[in-house]
Amino acid sequence: MRVRPVPGLSVSVDVHGHLDVVPEPAAPARQVRCGPVGTAMWLALRQHDGDVGAAARMLASLWDTEPANARADLDIWVDELRDAGLLRTEP
C-alpha cells in the first residue's frame, strides 16, 4: 500500500520538530499538527515514496523496536491523516 498527500497541502516543521499540515482554504480537509513522532512518520513515508511497509521498517530500525509494532503505529497514524482528508491511499 502507498499513501500520498492530497494536492494543495502546505507542510512545515518547526524548530521543535512539530509538523504542521495545512490544506488549502477550499479543501475538504482539516489542519493537523503532529509531534516529533508524527513528523518522523511523515518524513519516512515521503522518503519511501508512500510505501508504508518500507517506512515502517526504517522507523523500526531507528527506534529499535519490532517492525510489526512500528507498522501498527504507522497504520493508525495514516488512518488518522486519511480521515482528516490529508492522505489518500493508492494501490
Image (cartoon, helix red, strand yellow):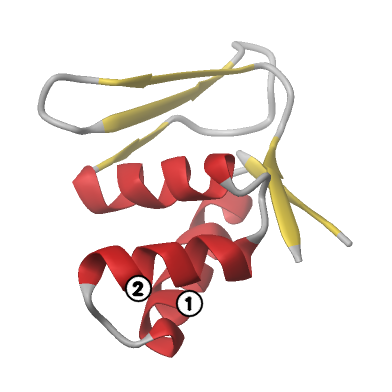
Marks 1 & 2, CB-CB < 8 Å contact: yes
* Relative vertical location of residue 75 with respect to residue 29 in this rendering, above or below: below
In the rendered structure, the answer to whether residue 84 lies left or right of residue 3 reads: left
Residue type, label 2: Ala
Furthest-left residue in this view: 16
Question: Does dot 2 land on a helix, a strand or a loop?
Answer: helix
The residue at the point 32 percent across, 32 percent down is 19
Vertical relation: 16 (above or below) 10: below
29 or 79, nearer to the observer: 79
Percent position (x, y) of residue 49? Answer: 68, 44
Q: Does dot 1 land on a helix, a strand or a loop?
A: helix
Q: Is residue 16 left or right of residue 76?
A: left
- Toward the right, the furthest residue is 91
Residue 60: assigned label: 2
Residue 8 left/right relative to 44: right
Q: Amino acid at mark 1?
A: Arg
Q: Residues within 10 Å of mark 2 (few under 14, many from 20)?
A: some
The structure residue drawn at horizontal position 89% and vertical position 62%, both measured from the top left corner, is 91
Residue 31 picture location, percent across and down: 45, 30
Q: Quadrant of residue 27?
A: top right
Crowd rating for badge 1 (residues with CA inside 10 Å; few <14, some 14–19, many 20+): some
Q: Which residue is mark 1?
A: 71
Q: Is residue 78 above or below residue 23?
A: below
Q: Residue at x 44, y 41 (%)?
A: 43
- Which of the marked residues, 1 or 2, is nearer the chain's N terminus? 2
Measured in 3D between alpha carbons, the distance from the residue under mark 1 to the one under mark 2, in whole angstroms, is 8 Å
